[in-house]
Amino acid sequence: MGGRQIVGAVFGTVFRVVVAAVVLMFIYRYSLMAYDYGYRIFGEEPVDEEPGRDVTIEVAESDDAQDIGLMLEQKGLIRDSKLFVIHEKLSGSETGIASGTYELNTAMTVDEMLDIMLTASEEANKASEE
């Protein structure tokens, strides 16, 4: 085996090890991020402890879950609007969130806020059917 072949073999091995290390680093990093996001979806704590502060929001007819999530984040009711969108999709509600005025509190979880908004939506839907 010549000197060039040995250098080439060593270089090839080092390159494979570095590529494997980088790939493992990315897998580890993004696995942690995915776990953290999944944990936050199902275990997100309220922004404030009891008693919190009351915040009134106005949901327009044209607002979708993303618009509402951004509004809640801007008003300090939630930390991440994307998590709100995921919660709304996982809620299984067929009617979605109805337009109107809602009194929410910073000590509420995302699920509690959604329950209030979806219950009002279901009641409005029942009233319109009658």
Image (tube, helix red, strand yellow):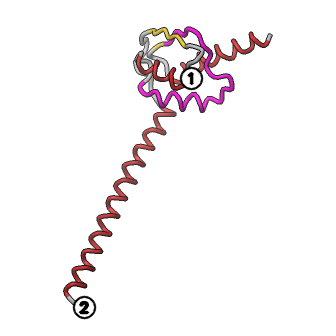
Q: Quadrant of the N terminus?
A: bottom left
Amino acid type of the residue tagged 2 in the rendering: Met
Which labelled disc corresponds to residue 109?
A: none
Horizontal relation, residue 42 to residue 124: left or right: left
Question: Badges 1 and 2: C-beta atoms under 8 Å apart?
Answer: no
Q: Residue at x 66, y 26 (%)?
A: 93
Q: Residue furthest front?
A: 62
Amino acid type, callout 1 = Asp
In this rendering, the answer to whether 73 lies above or below 129 is: below
Q: Earlier in the sequence, mark 1 or mark 2?
A: 2
Residue under the point 27% across and 80% down = 9
Classify residue 35 by image quadrant. Answer: top left
Residue 85 inside the magenta-drawn segment:
yes
Q: Position of residue 65 (x, y in %)?
A: 55, 24
Could you tell me which residue is drawn at 55 percent across and 8 percent down? 101
Crowd rating for badge 1 (residues with CA inside 10 Å; few <14, some 14–19, many 20+): some
Range of residues picked out in magenta? 79-104
**Left-right relation of 72 to 1:** right
Q: Tell me the distance, in whole angstroms, between the alpha carbons under discs 1 and 2.
A: 68 Å
Horizontal arrangement in the rendering, residue 44 relative to residue 111 (left or right)? left
Reading the image, the residue beneath label 2 is: 1
The numbered disc on residue 64 is 1
**Residue 52 in magenta stretch:** no
Which quarter of the picture shows residue 73? Answer: top left
Classed neighbour count for the residue bearing mark 2: other residues with Cα under 10 Å, few (<14), some (14–19), many (≥20): few
Residue 99: x %, y % from top left: 60, 13
Secondary structure at badge 2 equals: loop
| Residue 117 locus on image (x, y percent) | 59, 16
Residue 57 spot, x, y in % from top left:
50, 11
Q: Secondary structure at mark 1?
A: loop
Q: Residue at x 25, y 74 (%)?
A: 11
Q: Classify the position of the C terminus by image quarter.
A: top right
